[in-house]
Image: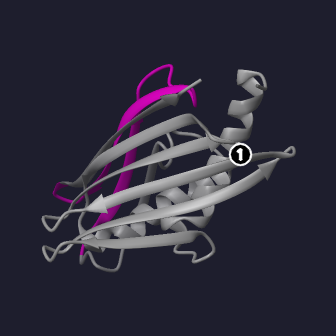
Amino acid sequence: MKKRVEILVGAKEAFFHAMSLGWASGSKAAAKVVDVLGSSGGEETAYITGLLYKNEWFRVVDRYCVSEAGKSAGTTTIWFHNDPVWFMSYGGSYLKEDIPFLKDALMRVYSTKQFFGGRGPTSLAQGVPHLKSGVLVYANEIEKDSTFDKFRGKEAIIGPVGIRGQHDYWGMALI
């Protein structure tokens, strides 16, 4: 097996490649599988993307589910050949009308390959049409010393009257 560091460099490239094609982008370029679970309205979605990096194959599986109550959870797993080498998990809830702002925050870091715990920038403020007054702020608090190998944090969208939604996240290398 290749050296751990080399594999994780490739995994990080695969992560940004997959995320730039996945849910936040709205792109249909990644394989998308949607399963509706029962009649309650719950939904599970998986984006599956591959990347050939330095003649080595990486596969990224980004899965999430949303309950009828609007809470969501997900995992992203990166595979090197047939071995899982990296993982992250996230969960919480956001208001539906704030999702475009969340996607914008995520895409800002995915497109520039900056790693802030696999989520968006440390902060971003933006006026949004659905709020009559004020601005939305995206805030990402990453634990000190977090790296692609091991990380934990919390992100939130904050409006004029407080927190509108948030997700906790964590992840680590599996090799």
Q: Nearer the viewer, residue 131 or 94?
A: 94
Q: Quadrant of residue 149?
A: top right
Residue 38 located left or right of residue 81: left
Residue at the location (62% across, 48% down)?
A: 15
Look at the image and tell me whether residue 126 can be seen: no
Q: In the image, is residue 30 part of the stretch drawn in magenta?
A: no
Quadrant location of the C terminus in the rendered image = top right
Q: Where are the magenta residues, as a range?
A: 133-162
Q: Position of residue 3 (x, y in %)?
A: 77, 22
Instruction: Looking at this view, name the residue that lies furthest to the right.
Output: 55
Q: Position of residue 106 (x, y in %)?
A: 50, 56
Report the predominant secondary structure element of the magenta stretch: strand
Residue at the location (48% across, 66% down)?
A: 23
Number of residues whose C-alpha sits closer than 10 Å to that of mark 1, classed few (under 14), some (14–19) or many (20 or more)? some
Q: Position of residue 151 (x, y in %)?
A: 46, 28
Residue at the location (86% across, 43% down)?
A: 54
Which residue is under mark 1? 13
Q: In the image, is residue 138 part of the stretch drawn in magenta?
A: yes
Query: Which coloring applies here?
Result: one colour
5 versus 155 height, above or below: above
